[in-house]
Image (cartoon, helix red, strand yellow):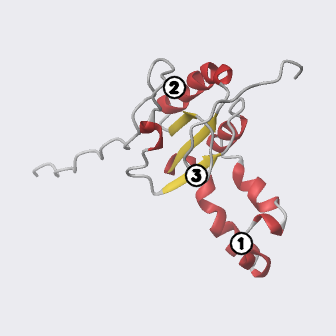
Amino acid sequence: AAPLATAPPPPPPLLSPPPPPARSPVPDLSALMLGGCGRVFIDGGSNMGEAVGAFADGRFFSCAMQAPPRNHRAAWASMGRGEKEASMGPLWEPRSFCVRSFEAAPSLLPPLRDEEASLRARGFDVRFVDGALSNRTVQATLARRRDG
């Protein structure tokens, strides 16, 4: 008998381009590209990457299920447990999301770049964006007080 033909393996998931090697005065807008993203997780303040790490480890499902109703859409209160679990089901699949996490403090970016490289090597479409998240486009200069 002739061997059965097999389909070629699926292509690897599309990942956004990696970050530039050094900080530049020109914003890196490639970090905002979401082509091929069916789902998006946005972290408004990276800090040390704790939220992105927890999300990538699949720890957001239980957090979402235990969160107070005010954290969910209005229909949440009337949903049964099965409906709630189905609604939050995608959180069990963090690789199905494009993750964009914003950090405006340049001193925090080097360890975030290391974490980004590690997560991308594991197949996550993660970018730590060098900048602040806002609902409008502005150019700003951030300053820190010397006393804290």
**Which of label 1 and label 3 is nearer to you?**
3
Picture disc at residue 73: 1
Label 1: element kind? loop
What amino acid is labelled 2 in the image?
A: Ala
| 72 or 32, nearer to the observer | 32
**Which of label 1 and label 2 is nearer to you?**
1
What amino acid is labelled 3 in the image?
A: Arg
Label 3: element kind? loop
Give percent across and percent down for residue 3. 14, 48
Give the spatial CA distance, label 3 vs label 2: 29 Å
Label 2: element kind? helix
Give percent across and percent down for residue 85. 69, 67
For the point 30% across and 47% down, the residue is: 10
Give the spatial CA distance, label 1 vs label 3: 25 Å
Comes first in the chain, label 1 or label 2: 1
| 51 or 33, nearer to the observer | 33
Q: Describe residue 10's horizontal placement relative to residue 48 as left or right.
A: left
Give the spatial CA distance, label 1 vs label 2: 34 Å
Q: Which residue is mark 2?
A: 117
| 110 or 104, nearer to the observer | 104
Residues tagged 1 and 3 counted as in contact (Cβ below 8 A): no
**Which of label 3 and label 2 is nearer to you?**
3
